[in-house]
Amino acid sequence: MIRILITDDHAIVRSGLKQLFAQISDFQVVGEAANGAELLAQLRELAVDLVLLDFDMPGISGADLIARVRSRYPQLPLLVLSMHNEAHLALRALKAGATGYITKDCNLDILLPAIRQVAGGNAFIAPGLADQMVLEEISGVQQAPHRLLTARELQVLRLLVNGLAVHEIAAELAISNKTVSTHKARAMQKMAITNTADLMRYALLHGMGGALVAAPQPTPG
């Protein structure tokens, strides 16, 4: 039996996965969490064989959350289930300590084997992403400025591009208005962009429509 802890900030996603897994004889959902803090609290209380983890959630999330879980539970299998199918983000998750990475648009013939393989201690990458990740690693192409941002800076800019105000972003990410403004200022400085209008033009020029994708950050030292 594979004991699964589902972590996703959307209740409907957690509910759908629980209903699906209830029909799988070797799967058992032992807990669920809506954010990183809840995940860490659940892990202190539950016996878990695998964490199924959304990448973007309010509060601590993404590579930061993966690294924190990995530091406390070095043997725990972590399977990222993300809405993003970009190689940069998958590589960032794996470098932070994720065991596997798949996308939310995958079919059951991908999801179920991925869970079983990762729970068994093996890596699993969504089909098509592995080759892209290799190319990203060996490519000498100059990075676009937005790929130099941290995950949180990128998240803030994505929401800005999608039309949210600072206070709305703060509510979405469960952080303060001041923190949002700080991330925004640092990100725009890195990108040499001075105003929101230029940011929108940058997103349009790069064909991103708000779906900015960060490159993996270098490991210190």
Image (cartoon, helix red, strand yellow):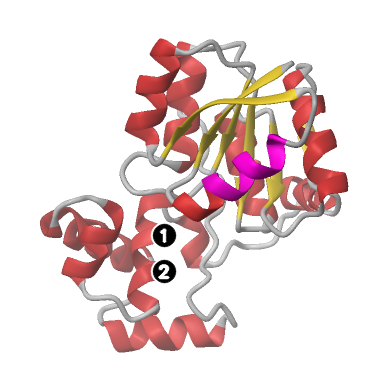
Residue at disc 1, secondary structure: helix
Residue 52 or residue 190, whichever sits in front: 52
Please name the residue shown 47% across and 13% down the image.
46
Residue type of the residue flagged with mark 2: Arg
> Is residue 221 in view?
no
Q: Position of residue 24 (x, y in %)?
A: 78, 32
Give the residue at x 16% y 67%.
167
Q: Kindly identify which residue carries mark 1.
A: 154
- Examine the rendered structure and indicate whether residue 170 appears above or below residue 94: below
SS at circle 2 = helix
Q: Are the residues flagged by discs 2 and 1 in contact, CB closer than 8 Å? A: yes
Residue 186: quadrant of the picture: bottom left
Please identify the residue farthest to the left as the structure is shown: 178
**Does residue 170 sit above or below 54 in this rendering?**
below
Magenta residues, start to end: 14-22
Quarter of the rendering containing residue 52: top right
The main secondary structure of the magenta stretch is helix
Q: Quadrant of residue 166?
A: bottom left
Q: State the separation of the CA atoms marked 2 and 1.
A: 6 Å
Kind of residue at disc 1: Leu
Whether the magenta-drawn stretch holds residue 10 is answered as: no
Give residue 211's position: percent from left, percent from top. 53, 70
**Can residue 21 be seen by looking at this rendering?**
yes
Residue underneath mark 2: 158
